[in-house]
Amino acid sequence: MHDLIRDMALRITSKSPLFMVKAGLRLLEFPSEQEWEENLERVSLMRNNIKEIPSNMSPHCEILSTLLLQHNVRLQRIPECFFVHMHGLKVLNLSRTDIEVLPSSVSDLTNLRSLLLGWCRGLERVPSVAKLLALQYLDLEGTWIEEVPEGMEILENLSHLYLISFPLAEFPAGILPRLRNLYKLKLLFGREALRETVEEAARLSDRLDTFQGHFSTLKDFNIYVKSADGRGSKNYCLLLWASGAGQFLTTDKSVRLINCKICEREEHIVLPNDVQRLQMKGVDDVASLNDVLPREQGLVNIGKFSHDLKVLEFESCNNLKNLFSIRLLPALQNLEVLEVEGCDSIAEIVAVEDEETEKELATNTIITLPRLKKLGFYYLPEFKSFCSDNGVLVCNSLQVIDVSSCPKLKRLSLSLPLLNNGQPSPPAALEVIGIKKELWESLEWDQANAKDVLNPYCKFGEF
């Protein structure tokens, strides 16, 4: 908090006993019991260096409604008696503290509406929440709990549930259908996820505004997508990652695949048919995006692949040879961002897949991506061109081109708009081209004067 704002808050609250604001003051000691007056309504002690609360402290603050203790990263223990006289508490925020055990007296805070314990990495257990029937917001993201809190299934007023804990082996079946008012759900299904739980989440998804699901196995991921059957929530992020936790994307409808196999012989990934952002990181069993396309009787069915894709991101996919074939272009007409980084084998973006297509390319094939705004190519040792020698890329909405550490790049394959006199002109929205000067000077162009036209947009550096 800015010093002036803090001083103003302190002046205001010093005139009234209803608030105690000591946020961001680097406090080492917890306020004494004398400072906890009976008519306190709100207390903020967040972003301090408080390590402990005195073991016998039990403030008589029956009308206290808000207690903010988040970001006291050294706070490890809260005495069992601390909450005994705080029955009016509605908001309790202990996020990003180092607490290991939550006092059982929290179970009697029957007016509690928000219990925020996000990123309490030492927290292994939460006491019963069966009496917390007013609870609307429960944040257990980034904790280390091994079991779901007792009584969660009867929290019918719960609208926000965030439960990401890597030690949690499974989320029990039968809980999600009873949470009738859920609006946002963030859930790690666990290493031993129950098929029934995954299906329950899928059936629930069309009632949710936002769903963020972390799956540890390809099988569970596919069960969810197939069970949802196009009824997904308004916003979602599906994460497939066996060894990590969290790290969701924030886009509206996204899929993130990290260090996993998605094209196994027994199981082939199924993507939502409305996904807008697809990110693959460390996925080494695909040579092209075509490998993940829907198939029927062994044949690729492009019609069932999402035509809503706006963002494609590939990182450290070392067996990737190209991103997609020309046949996939009709499904990519809404693409806005294309970024490739650290993929050691990729030589081109658009591939020629058969002799017939190669004959078409002999007379220059135009590859149109009308909404593309950004192209980013980073650390690609074998990358030579966007497409084959006779293909040209038309993307008149392009704003940014970034190229870094692509030593073998020869052509960007760009086809620039033409003026009335037949001379090329830059895309109207173009803002910057980030590239190393030596590489820029060595690029080949299909249109005369193209390099001179684009040169004013170049930002040269040690890319």
Image (cartoon, rainbow, N blue to C red):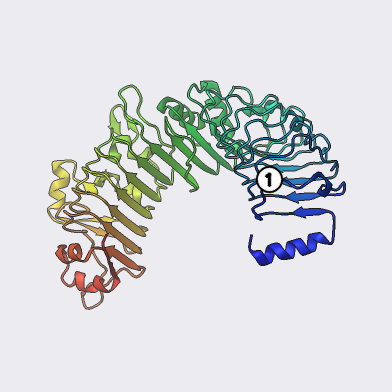
Percent coordinates x, y for residue 199 in the rendering: 53, 26
Q: What element carries label 1?
A: loop
- For label 1, the residue is 69
- Residue 43 left/right relative to 189: right
Percent coordinates x, y for residue 267 in the rendering: 35, 25
Residue furthest out toward the bottom? 421
Q: Residue at x 45, y 37 (%)?
A: 239
Between residue 445 and residue 99, name the one nearer to us.
Answer: 99
Q: Which residue is drawn at 65% across and 42% down?
A: 51
* Quarter occupied by residue 150: top right
- Residue 131 left/right relative to 319: right
Quarter the C terminus occupies = bottom left
Q: Can residue 312 be seen in this view?
A: yes
Q: Which residue is drawn at 17% across and 46% down?
A: 357
Looking at the image, residue 297 lies above or below residue 115: above
* Quarter occupied by residue 124: top right
- Residue 45 left/right relative to 237: right
Between residue 58 and residue 2, name the one nearer to us.
Answer: 58
Percent coordinates x, y for residue 16 in the rendering: 85, 58
